[in-house]
Image (cartoon, rainbow, N blue to C red):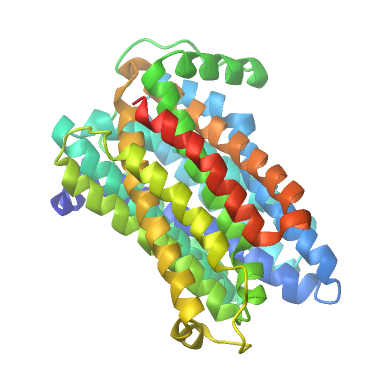
């Protein structure tokens, strides 16, 4: 599996995706820290509102542009589209530099929307490219590497965005975008495997069409629903990491620990299940992993009911307490289960439909993911004031039991 990284038919795509995910999260994190401790430092309530809106701004392009990106990727050479998208990222970095230098909230929000659009355009390309360039027995390993690398890149971007100064963040953004463009230029040609209709300029109609197409195939439908649940659950949990760490008496380092455990756990689970699958698209692990996700999420809710007596705690002091060790262990196991759960579903997404419509199926999955994250945010808003964070996690665990039934049908 690791040998794929040295192959031109995988390595450049892997690097391109890895650096794109890093840049997205580096800018997003740098923006939130600048807003919280700079632009709105005297208005914490306004800063919290901007942080919530930032998530919506990044997700919105997936709802708006996924149909266009999927239809374009099925009609034209995917490697060429990847180069166009990475070239556009350089222009985004220029806008990011201006926004960070001026500390302009409107420009920061516009740039964040642009990074979301960049990711929404590249998403269908990367997952439609993998089955086109990899042998069937390599697809699972390649998918696992992409998932593991993406979550580790997200973690690195989130951490560095909060640690480095604006000038250093901009230099990192520019260097990463340049290397990403060079990597994209090394992706081998990937012409469309079959005839595809021209992209529909009516985005609402195009979105409805790709969703109907993907959800009409039972295996695709269950894969899309399962992936959407994982990303909704992940969004709900990670949004709660900073306030959860604070409620448990932890300093900011405890929130960083939670992010690290989640990202590393998903990477470990993804790589582990790919070795178990041995190159074949096996979905038997999905249902047990879905059950583990539901039970561990509920367990996390129970474990976080009572804060430790001593506070404030740094990361090491937190895990040295019995309650802190239990929370950290449950979170790591939950993330490992997530990695085991997601790889078979993505492998199914890439193989269950027709090759000529693969990018549109991936685009439909992205739309469903965005909708699920919006819905789980609404659930969080409704549950948190009444039941708090433990109640939210118990609720999410109960909802997760429905994902077990969907996973079993694969």
| Above or below 42: residue 74 | above
Rendered view: 397 above or below 322: above
Position of 60 relative to 73 (above/below):
below
Provide residue 270's location: percent of width, then percent of height: 30, 50
Q: Position of residue 164 (x, y in %)?
A: 55, 77
Q: Eyeballing the image, is 286 above or below 271?
A: above
Residue 70 image position (x, y, % from top left): 48, 25
Judged left or right of residue 197, residue 45 is right
Locate residue 168 relative to residue 138 in the image: left or right: right
Name the residue nearer the viewer: 121 or 144: 144
What quarter of the picture does the C terminus occupy? top left
Q: Is residue 119 left or right of residue 40?
A: left
The residue depicted at 29 percent of the width and 17 percent of the height is: 193
Residue at position x 44%, y 22% from top? 221
Q: Nearer the viewer, residue 164 or 312?
A: 312
Residue found 64% across the figure and 15% down from its top = 205
**Number of marks drawn:** 0
Q: Nearer the viewer, residue 304 or 144?
A: 304
**Residue 186 shows in this picture:** no
Residue 247 appears in the picture as rendered:
yes
Residue 189 rendering spot, x and y as whole percentages? 27, 31
Using the image as rendered, state which of residue 14 and residue 187 is in the foreground: 14
As drawn, is 366 to the left or to the right of 266? right
The residue positioned 45% from the left and 29% from the top of the image is 224
């Amino acid at each position: 599996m690791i040998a794929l990284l040295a192959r031109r038919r995988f390595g450049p795509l892997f690097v391109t995706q890895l650096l794109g995910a890093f840049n997205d999260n580096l800018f997003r994190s740098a923006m939130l820290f600048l807003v919280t401790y700079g632009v709105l430092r005297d208005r914490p309530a306004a800063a919290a509102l901007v942080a919530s809106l930032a998530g919506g701004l990044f997700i919105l392009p997936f709802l708006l542009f996924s149909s266009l990106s999927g239809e374009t990727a099925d009609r034209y050479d995917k490697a060429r589209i990847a180069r166009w998208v990475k070239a556009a990222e350089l222009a985004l970095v220029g806008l990011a530099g201006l926004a960070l230098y001026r500390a302009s909230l409107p420009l920061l929000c516009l740039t964040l929307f642009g990074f979301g659009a960049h990711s929404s355009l590249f998403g269908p390309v990367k997952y439609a490219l993998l089955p086109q360039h990899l042998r069937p027995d390599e697809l699972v390993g390649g998918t696992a590497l992409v998932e593991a690398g993406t979550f580790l890149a997200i973690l690195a971007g989130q951490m560095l965005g909060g640690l480095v100064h604006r000038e250093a963040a901009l230099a990192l953004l520019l260097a990463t975008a340049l290397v990403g463009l060079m990597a994209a230029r090394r992706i081998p040609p990937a012409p469309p495997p079959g005839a595809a209709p021209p992209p529909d300029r009516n985005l609402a109609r195009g979105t409805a069409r790709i969703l109907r197409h993907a959800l009409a195939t039972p295996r695709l439908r269950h894969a899309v629903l399962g992936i959407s649940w994982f990303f909704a659950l992940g969004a709900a949990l990670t949004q709660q990491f900073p306030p959860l760490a604070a409620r448990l008496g932890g300093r900011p380092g405890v929130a960083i620990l939670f992010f690290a455990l989640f990202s590393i756990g998903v990477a470990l689970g993804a790589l582990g299940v790919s070795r178990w699958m041995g190159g074949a698209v096996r979905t038997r692990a999905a249902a047990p992993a879905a059950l583990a996700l539901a039970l561990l999420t509920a367990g996390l809710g129970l474990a976080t009911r009572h804060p430790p007596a001593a506070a404030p705690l740094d990361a090491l002091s937190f895990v040295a307490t019995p309650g802190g060790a239990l929370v950290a262990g449950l979170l790591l196991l939950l993330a490992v289960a997530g990695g085991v759960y997601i790889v078979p579903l993505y492998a199914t997404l890439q193989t269950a439909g027709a090759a000529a419509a693969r990018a549109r199926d991936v685009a439909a999955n992205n739309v469903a993911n965005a909708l699920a994250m919006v819905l789980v945010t609404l659930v969080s808003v409704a549950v948190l004031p009444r039941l708090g964070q433990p109640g939210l996690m118990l609720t999410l665990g109960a909802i997760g039991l429905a994902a077990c039934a969907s996973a079993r049908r694969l």
